[in-house]
Amino acid sequence: MLFNSYSFLFLFLPFTLLVFFLLGKYRRSLAGLWLFGASLFFYAWWNPAYVGLLLASVLFNYGVGQAIVREHVRGREKLKRTILIFGIASDLGLLAYYKYANFFVTNVSSLLNNGWHVEPVILPLGISFFTFTQIAFLVDAYLGKVKESNFIHYGLFVTYFPHLIAGPVLHHKEMMSQFAQPATYRIHWENFSVGLSLFSFGLFKKVVLADGIAPFANLLFTAANHGNMLTFTEAWGGALAYTFQLYFDFSGYTDMALGISCLFGVKLPINFDSPYKAVNIIDFWRRWHMTLSRFLRDYLYFPLGGNRKGKFRRHFNLMATMLLGGLWHGAGWTFVIWGGLHGMYLVINHSWHGLRERLGFPVEKISRTGRIVGMMITFPAVVLAWVFFRASNIHAALHIVSSMIGLNGIMLPGRSVFSGHQVEVMEKLGIHFGPAPLLYGHVAIWKWIVVLSAIAWFTPNSQQILSNYQPTLEQVTSEGWLRWQPNMVWLGIIIAILLYSIIGMEKVSEFLYFQF
């Protein structure tokens, strides 16, 4: 079931809320059980056959967590560690089978030329997210940070439908304290106002903005996959179209997840914080899919040694973490390259910070000019990496990249705005004028890019707009000039946004992060 569907918006969500608060009025345990069951139904809407897999994973990790806690109390560290390794290995083994079996067999068969093949394995929806959530729980149980004896509470923590399919990746301690509060099970109209407003922002981002620019991105990547000649303008237009499609698609999903959870009186951690405003790639990863970045840092980068064993080891750990992070996003060499590019970016960024510190320039203090220059360097680097993230194969990605750097020549529209001498000089430099075949007649793509870039760079994000009412677990600081208030003006704005988005929901499309 999709957040941006009529069945969810007009049937599932209101009915789930109604029964949750009715049960919560009399017995909280029944309300929790209802929400657990509703979350399983939400997941089953995609494919009922995989509910058994989800439940088996929940039961297995609950049992392993109980065993770890028991051995922690008894002080048997060696056995506790063995149980943890067994649990994590089992989780990763399940994830590897469903996500990487086809990729592994195809590559081995190609390398050995032995004709191996397996029946295509269907990737269960959200398996990466509920697997990572439970691995985090097992590690926290091993460290003595959490314990959970109530199976219903644990099941709800894992399957809670606002985060189940595409995150955020949660920690047990973030959720259980909220589900234990009596206030969670009572209706608070402020939560409804904030939650519906946040949901409306997200629905608009997905249905109107992301889906609006998506056809232009699809046009470029389909053409590249077929080997069509691409001009400089077309390559950059399509790459930027996908860059903003992904931004508003994921930002929209995050807003909707936060908003839905607010309706239930539960706050989720912030997961998306205007990443295209990042002044460097380190800053980007503090803003993009923040809970995944946190997971990779805490459970992969730090265990590898982090920055504690010298510069070379730190750079190796960064590269290894990002390569595995790329592979987590998808079983394909394009994702590995995307992760490798970001690993390389991070190594360069950390090296630059080290040089600045040695020269006596504090890393924390960046001038306004420095911030602008940093954004101008970071954003194109991110766009270039997104090409590999989106392309169906390496050949198509390289085809687009070669056009983006001008290897296929540069063709621009608008010859008439230059003088004859200017045109002559530009043509000697390899810049020509004429219609771009793919984007000819599609001037709208650049209008979309201008509007969406202005929103991404110059407006506060949804959490900042609603910062007076703190819709997330973390405190958010507002940029000041646009703040939501529970008044008639904002009511009119939210109704208009919601109605316009609902009208545009006739053609339902999945969120891009559902494929991971």
Image (spheres, rainbow, N blue to C red):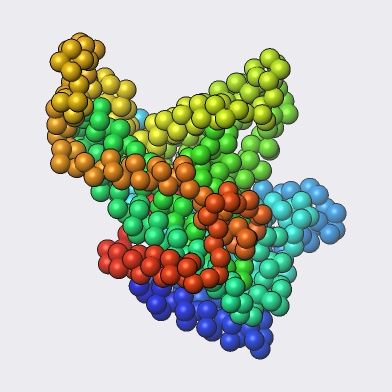
Residue 80 versus residue 23: which sits nearer the camera? 23
Can you give x and y, in whole percent of width and height, for residue 131 in the image?
Answer: 55, 55
Picture residue at 45% right of the left edge, 33% below the top: 379
Residue 259 versus residue 466: which sits nearer the camera? 466
Residue 511 shown left or right of residue 488 in the figure? left
Toward the bottom, the furthest residue is 26
Residue 296 shown left or right of residue 224 in the figure? right
Residue 423 shown left or right of residue 52 in the figure? left
Report which quarter residue 56 is drawn in. bottom right
Residue 97 versus residue 180: which sits nearer the camera? 180
Report which quarter residue 307 is drawn in. top right
Picture residue at 38% right of the left edge, 57% below the top: 206
Q: Is residue 271 above or below residue 48?
A: above
Can you give x and y, in whole percent of width and height, for residue 243 in the image?
Answer: 38, 41
The answer, for residue 81, to whether it is visible in the render is yes
Residue 324 shown left or right of residue 312 in the figure? left
Picture residue at 19% right of the left edge, 42% below the top: 442
Q: Is residue 149 above or below residue 104?
A: below
Report which quarter residue 509 is drawn in. bottom left
Q: Where does the N terminus fall, quadrant-wise?
A: bottom left
Picture residue at 34% right of the left edge, 38% below the top: 240
Can you give x and y, in whole percent of width and height, for residue 436 in the image?
Answer: 17, 32
The answer, for residue 90, to whether it is visible in the render is no
